[in-house]
Image (cartoon, helix red, strand yellow):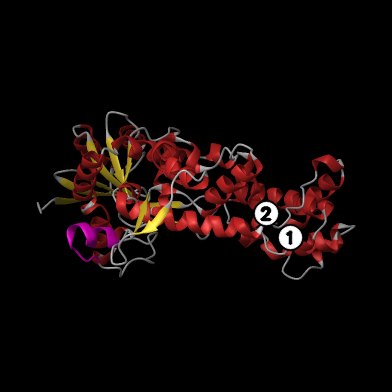
Amino acid sequence: MKTLEQIVVADPLSLRDCCAHLAATTLLGFDTEFVGEETYEPDLCLIQVSTADALFLIDPLTAGPLDAFWKLLVDPARTVVVHAGREETRMCRRQSGSTPSNWFDLQIAAGLVGLNYPLGHGPLIYQLLDIQLSKAETLTEWRHRPLTPAQLDYAFDDVRFLLPLWQILEKQLTELGRRDWAQQEFTRFVSQALPEFSAQPAARDKWRKLKGLGVLDRRRLGLVREMFLAREAVAAQMNRPPRVLVRDDLLVELARRNPKTPDEIQVVRGMAKRFVQPLWDAIEHARKLPANELPMNIEREQDPPQVTVIVNLLGAILNDFCAREKLAVSLTATVSDMKDLVRSKMQNIPPAETNLLMAGWRLEFVLPILLGVLEGKRSVRITNLQAESPFALE
């Protein structure tokens, strides 16, 4: 493998030279190091970039304004290679105001050529390049300066292999005729990482993941929802993690108690005084909501027993199909997708719009197999107990 020049960019002049180098290439690797445990938005601590000739570590704390760099990154004429680049996507949008235009995510590409999904950066390098990376700096403190030699080596390694991995996976995608599939997945992945997706109804229901909601009536669920949203707003304003301000269990406990005054909030152990008023305002707002605007109780699924049996069968068939077709099953469909498909056939209603099987390459390539079995048009038999894909569909 070609030895690449390693350059630390720590001042405006070095940044100018770095951007000039990047402007002359149409392919680069990109990664970031950030710390997010203590803030609502992660603190950007380091930017790593690779090209065919050099590796760059850009220090955002000392290199000066990065506007020129972010502009290069979102240029559609330039392919940007990332690995599991959710935070890189969000950071790019936050810093530049633009959506990444030409993203290539190695983790997704690996799943589309038959490797596991999601596959970590180190395991992917080992499987495709037979190189073992050190994990010594995984939990390092990236905000401290100067960075140690070990930190620098680790950071350079994070982008050192992105382009060689891209070369292998791009070739395999092309050979399998799945380059268009990959582009569909990259676009979906980027859109789900952006703030607009978080504003959609399904994403706004994150409060339903809190534990202990099953015993609350609709009015108390309304209290939880409004307090949760108030906590998010305060956390964003203060740039602090929401759970650090008010723990999840305290929101549920307050809803259960249904406090009548702010003092009744403050007496709850673990509640900081400065967050009492925002929560009280949220509670008063929730109390004024008409009944039809309160959250519905989500009933436990009461599927007939055959649904589980059929979904298990579809899961086995999908696993067999993906092994034969070089696809990661976890990237193809979820158990919820298959349950929704079975219910739609049983009840003669359309599948949910969020069902992955109802769009793009899955609709064309995967759904017909599952529907063929569901509709009795295809049968399954075991043909080879020793094979990775032992079934035959007839």
Residue at 60% in and 55% down: 307
283 drawn magenta: no
- Whether residue 34 is visible: no
Q: Regarding mark 1 in the picture, which secondary structure is present there? A: helix
Residue at 70% in and 56% down: 302
Residue at 28% in and 63% down: 387
Residue in the foreground of this view, choosing between 116 and 323? 323
Residue at 31% in and 58% down: 121
Q: Position of residue 19 (x, y in %)?
A: 25, 36
Q: Earlier in the sequence, mark 2 or mark 1?
A: 2
- Whether residue 16 is visible: yes
- CB of mark 2 within 8 Å of CB of mark 1? yes
Q: Is 144 above or below relative to 206?
A: below
Give the crowd class for mark 2: few <14, some 14-19, many >=20 residues within 10 Å.
some
Looking at this view, name the residue that lies furthest to the left: 2
Place residue 73 in its image quadrant.
Answer: top left
Residue at image mark 2? 208
Determine the CA span between mark 2 and mark 1: 7 Å
Q: Position of residue 332 (x, y in %)?
A: 42, 48
Residue in the foreground of this view, choosing between 173 and 135? 173
Residue in the foreground of this view, choosing between 320 and 292? 320
Q: Which residues are magenta?
A: 122-133
